Image: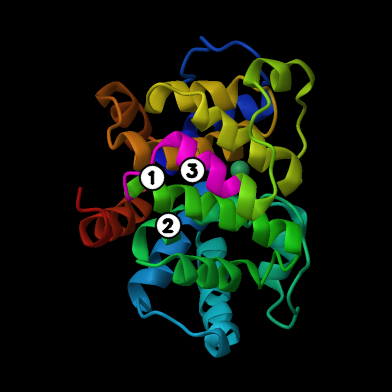
Amino acid sequence: MLGAIYGDIIGSYYEVHCTKDYDFPLNKESHFTDDSVLTIAVCKAILNFPDDIKKLGLRKRAKEYAAMYRHYYSCFPGAGFGNMFSKWARNHDLGNIKSYGNGGAMRVIPIGYAYSTEEQVLLQVKASCMPTHKHKEAINGAGAVAMAVFLARKGKSKEEIKEYIEKNHGYDLSIPLSQIREKHIFDSRTSYSVPSAIIAFLESTDYESAVRNAVSLGGDADTEACIAGGIAEAFYKEIPDHIRRFCESRLDSSLKKTAREFCEKYITD
Ligand SMILES: [Mg+2]
């Protein structure tokens, strides 16, 4: 799960200073953004309400996720939240938003760790998206990300993960990253940025290369690296020490505490 947060931190500088260079340096101005804050909000929502839900419990569960998103927004309002999200978070009377942005997919990595069946992962993903990303594209992309984590931690191969997502989520994951990189731009639509982040993982050889692949697409770098890094950690099960050190020093201590609590409970291998 920390792999997602480290990806966000490393990508944060390059979200503004786009790069197509795979060998980009880790920049000292890197910092955690909304991707990390909301990933931790999802961790906290799972820690507080760990039980499985049924279809009938979706609305109630969505409200629990929503309350946690608002709480974490109020703690870190300057973390880089989008306008639409900020408006929703500040106004408790606003109903669900139907965004098709990648904000639903960027925060679901913990769900892939915490639940033990495909059905439950997808129900939790849906509940987690409903408050702000109630668009079928956003829910589909978030489901693909959480299921990639779920399958990776179950020891599935990249080929199996690729086939599952292509079949169940309708993405074409066979386009080479080099071809995507040529034209890739900053575009935070789920259907544009999520498949490329998953391909960044599929073409990687270890955690660091997944994050480098994602950042050097030159697009929504923090979010794409958050997603690629989150899946890569579940698959490779290790993160190099120099990356861990670089990112830990840039993470707020209360976020760190909740992340640690989540990892101790749900990440056993
Ligand atoms: Mg961000």
Look at the image and tell me whether residue 85 can be seen: yes
Q: Which residue is mark 1?
A: 152
> Which of labels 1 and 2 is toward the front?
1
Label 1 Cα crowd, 10 Å radius (few <14 / some 14-19 / many 20+) = many
- Examine the image and state in which quarter residue 12 appears: top right
- Would residue 110 appear left or right of 267 to someone viewing this image? right
Residue 76 % position (x, y): 53, 56
Kind of element beneath mark 2: helix
Mark 1 C-beta closer than 8 Å to ligand 1? no
Image: 269 above or below 180:
below
Residue shown at 49% from the left, 54% from the top: 147
Kind of element beneath mark 3: helix
Q: Which residue is mark 2?
A: 112
Residue 153 % position (x, y): 33, 48
Q: Which residue is mark 3?
A: 161
Q: Earlier in the sequence, mark 3 or mark 2?
A: 2
Is the Cβ of the residue at disc 1 closer than 8 Å to that at disc 2? Answer: yes
- Would residue 227 appear left or right of 220 to someone viewing this image? left
Image: 144 above or below 73:
above
Residue shown at 66% from the left, 68% from the top: 89
Residue 255 included in the magenta stretch of the image = no
Residue 158 included in the magenta stretch of the image = yes
